[in-house]
Image (spheres, rainbow, N blue to C red):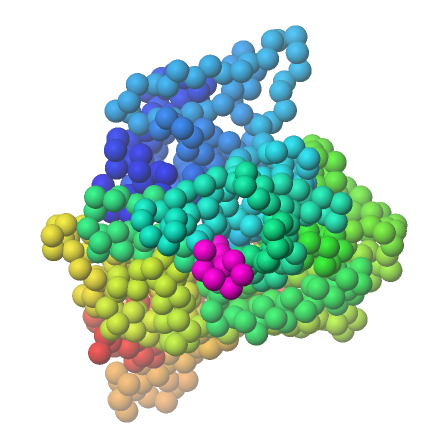
Amino acid sequence: MLAVCSQLPGPWAKICQQHGTVFAWAHNGSKPSGGWIEIKSGGMLASKWGDGMWSQVPGNPHRLDITFGAARHICHMVEGSCFEVVRRLSAKTEKELGDPKVNGVAVTTRGWPTSLQPPAVKQDLPAPSTPPAKKRELRDDMGTPEKTSAPKRRRLAATGDMSSVKGKSVQAAAAAAATVFGGTWSIEVNGEAWGKAHVGSTGGYFTFAKGGVGAEVCMAFQISGDGTPQDPFRIDDGDSHACLKSSSKGVREWTLAGGGRSVWTHDEQASWCDSLIEDKDASPIARCLTRAAAALRPGAGNGRLPGREGEQSEVEHFLRDAVATGGRQQVMYVAGMPGTGKTASVLEVVSRLERASESGKLPKFTFLHVNGMCLSSPMAVFSDILQQLQAQRNGFARAPMSGSRAYEELTRLFSDRGKDDETIVLLIDEIDSLVSPGQTVLYQLFNWMSLQNARLALVSIANTMDLPERLLPRIASRLAVVPVKFAAYDRPQLRRIMADRLWLAKAEGAFTKDALEICAAKVAAASGDARKALQVCRRAIEIQLEECSASELGPVTLKHVTAAEESLLRVNPATKSIEGLSLKARRLLLAVVLEMKRSENILVPLRDALRRYVNIMTSSQRREDGDSSSASAQDSMPSEHADDAQFILKRLEAMHLLRIHCTGSWSDDTAMCAMYMEGSGQEVMLGVGQSLDADDVADALSGCLEDDVAKDLLDIPDAS
């Protein structure tokens, strides 16, 4: 249980430590009817309805994203050890699902530890004759400024709750204040250290030592106002008051009523650590490891992306200019291998621009975010864009329409926009997933940029470096494509990322120096994927917590990092199946991985992979036969190996070790289709299976003892 609790956010970890990791699950909010879920280590989940997975919702420690069956459930921990499902989405399409209904009336799904009695909760059910109540708003809990101000428009579009946080009520004022002041701040008054301020969405409190000695004193306060010139932010703590004079990155300056000035400096470490609930009875090293595990989760870096300052600057310059001038006709194309910080960098830039917009330094703009991997078909991108736009403008989205009708409506909208309309910033992630016959969808998207009154800025993110030139020659020649390339992280950058996360959590002592160095070196040599490095480090902490008693705990060492790498490789059944493949099948996989590494693309042309495969097989055969094979036999080798590849492709795709991406029509036999289309001059791409990355496959191939060719060509470094 200790390993599980170390991975959970604070409120959930506290409940699991006290009452266990098994929760009753009541669809109607009060009667579980045998329903249950069990939270397991490593993001895994067991339930009455089958296995699933869980992850933390970035920026909100009270929430878990729990997936089982066909749905994702955003679960919010409330008072009394009970959680509520505040959102339900389709696991396949990411579309919003309604709440369960009892007698035609929507109810709230709840859960609680099975060791406790069901909470006495009464559902507020409307009478049958009244219309259903509006969907409840998402809560906004205390967090750091970066967490509070992350792009809310994208996350809330599907709920219809797009109202501004500014308002005259106390609750609205507190929410507005949390956007600007959320987190922990070190305070100086007239140049002398005074204490700290802690601000959340429901209010704030000061902590200081009275008279400079003795116990720490806490004093509540409220920030009122909405930040406009007519109603500026101010503090009234009962004794005096202050008005906000200026605001810059990480600094807030106040003018005191009695004269003088107060300067608040954002304490990033304290802000992050305040969001965790630690077990005060645990040993210092156990608390350090717990903080480290939390800091190494995806999305836990507070928007900090070491090593990506230059790329973020390029994206920010492009978008800032687009928002200020009413759009750009150029398309920004962000490309790089998975795990290089592409999406996180763009979202961090959007978050900065949203803060600038809220403070009046930039015009207002509308942000839309679509992920191509979450769509049921390429044409569905237009329906998704239209629904998000409707939700932000009207507070609700109409029923989804077909992709073609949505495209027509959006084209009419972009053709007739006024100069006072907000600029629309459209981010399309995984845009290479929208490849279709004739590239119709991509041409339609990019053609919007040529409309005179579109007031649109388009940022596309892909894993393929040369998509515009290779698949969209007409667009690339007519529109200026602004490329931003994200290279794979190198060893110093990965080391800095992990060290920065540990610093943020005040957990620098969680790892020995050589453990971090070797982890960074191995991941940099294999793929440069920062997510893989963080995953290995988190697993190493779990192994340390599982193997050692409380009295034996110490920092994570190189031994734990090595065990973590082996453990993660075994967890994926697809990589395990590689060991049972034939020699030819493994070498075709090897050819694909080598081409992915050479081109730094997640998809590679079939012809390049086949050429590499033929070369590997031919050179291996010649090495084994020496000069004993005849010249005619050697001449026949390439055609023989090319014929074999057709059948191997079919098997590897059926095992989900390879995926074949065709730009033409699909058939039931995609491998045969791919070979036919390649022969007819059409584009066919290969990549590793959805549950794999090139690093996983390379490790599995190099682990096959009887095949030295893979080790030689991949040149996998050892721990030394």
**Residue 635 percent across, percent down from the top left:** 41, 84
- Specify whether 137 is left or right of 580: right
The boundaries of the magenta stretch are 185-194
User: Residue drawn 56% across and 50% down?
Assistant: 181
Q: Residue at x 49, y 65 (%)?
A: 305
Asked if residue 698 lies left or right of residue 385, the reply is left
Q: Nearer the viewer, residue 440 or 266?
A: 266
Q: Quadrant of the N terminus?
A: top left
The percent coordinates of residue 652 (x first, y second) are: 40, 58
Q: In the rendered image, which quarter contains the C terminus?
A: bottom left
Q: Position of residue 575 (x, y in %)?
A: 32, 58
Determine if the magenta segment contains residue 592: no
For the residue pair 511 and 189, the one nearer the viewer reads as 189
Determine which quarter of the picture holds residue 324. bottom right
How many numbered dots are placed on residues in this image?
Answer: 0
Identity of the residue drawn at 51% across and 31% down: 86
**Residue 693, image x, y percentages:** 41, 62
| Residue 710 visible in the picture | no
650 to 203, vertically: above or below? below
The residue lying at 65 percent from left, 47 percent from top is: 233
Query: Can I make out residue 558 in this image?
Result: yes
Viewer-proximal residue, 96 or 582?
96
Q: Is residue 32 left or right of residue 324?
A: left
Q: Compare residues 562 and 265 and report the one nearer the observer.
A: 265
Magenta stretch contains residue 189: yes
- Rendered view: 224 above or below 263: above
Looking at the image, residue 214 lies above or below residue 472:
above
Q: Taken as a whole, is the magenta stretch helix, strand or loop?
A: strand
